[in-house]
Image (cartoon, rainbow, N blue to C red):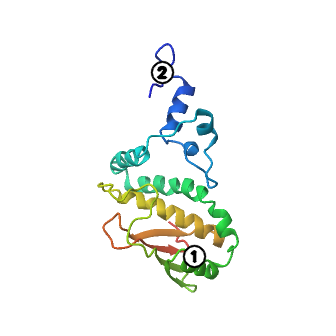
Amino acid sequence: MDISDATGGTTRRSFLRSACLMGFCACAAPNAKGEAGAHAESEGERPPPGMPRKWIATLLPLMATIDPDEARRILKRCSSSHYEDLAMDETVSRFHGDVSSFVDFLRTEWGWIVDFDPVSGVVVVNENKVACVCPLISPDHGSDLGMLCSCSEGFAERMFSAITGAPVRAEVTESILRGGERCRYRIELKARRA
């Protein structure tokens, strides 16, 4: 894709257009209603099939070269795009202040196996799936993408924080991408202070 202007230099517009089309922003992806974002509509283009997954497979090994805590923080923040695409605030809003009802929802609607101890404020989740359900991963990815599971921690933290109205702490304790049999989380509703 050529992102240069008539003089051979890169313009801001051509750079942003290129970034959007290559999936660096979420505008080219369909929103929760299946409609393309504003940039994609005006340009009429989409990234090539498989390109976002290849981009991620290239990025994650590079992320492994930076401080692990910083890489984890970055990936946890990336969860916001998936959370918002699924309109999760609408889903969880009806459970505000009612963790037990939300746990029941996860069991019945999502098929998760969930243990909740209201006294300790700990939720232990097993997604109860035999394959990774991350929308960014293809079953034949062939790469070590386990770091990407930090995104799931951010997603879980945002969900449960919306319900409790307070910060929570989530940790992936086992995942298929990290060699486990299932994806499991531990969510502490009474987040420890660092």
Decide which of tag 2 and tag 1 comes sooner along the chain: 2
Q: Quadrant of residue 146?
A: bottom left
- Above or below residue 90? Residue 120 is below
The residue labelled by disc 1 is 109
Q: Is residue 69 left or right of residue 28?
A: left
Residue shown at 54%/74% (left/top)? Answer: 110
- Which of labels 2 and 1 is toward the front? 1
Q: Indicate whether 157 appears above or below 37.
A: below
Quarter of the image for residue 98 reads: bottom right
- Disc 2 is placed on an element classified as loop
Query: Is 144 on the left-hand or right-hand side of 32?
Result: left
Which residue is disc 2 drawn over? 4
Q: Amino acid at mark 1?
A: Glu
Crowding at mark 2 (Cα within 10 Å: few <14, some 14-19, many 20+)? some
Residue plotted at (52% across, 74% down): 188
Residue 134: quadrant of the picture: bottom left
Where does the image place residue 135, in percent across and percent down from the top left?
46, 57
Q: Residue at coordinates 55% horizontally, 47% vertically from top-left?
A: 29
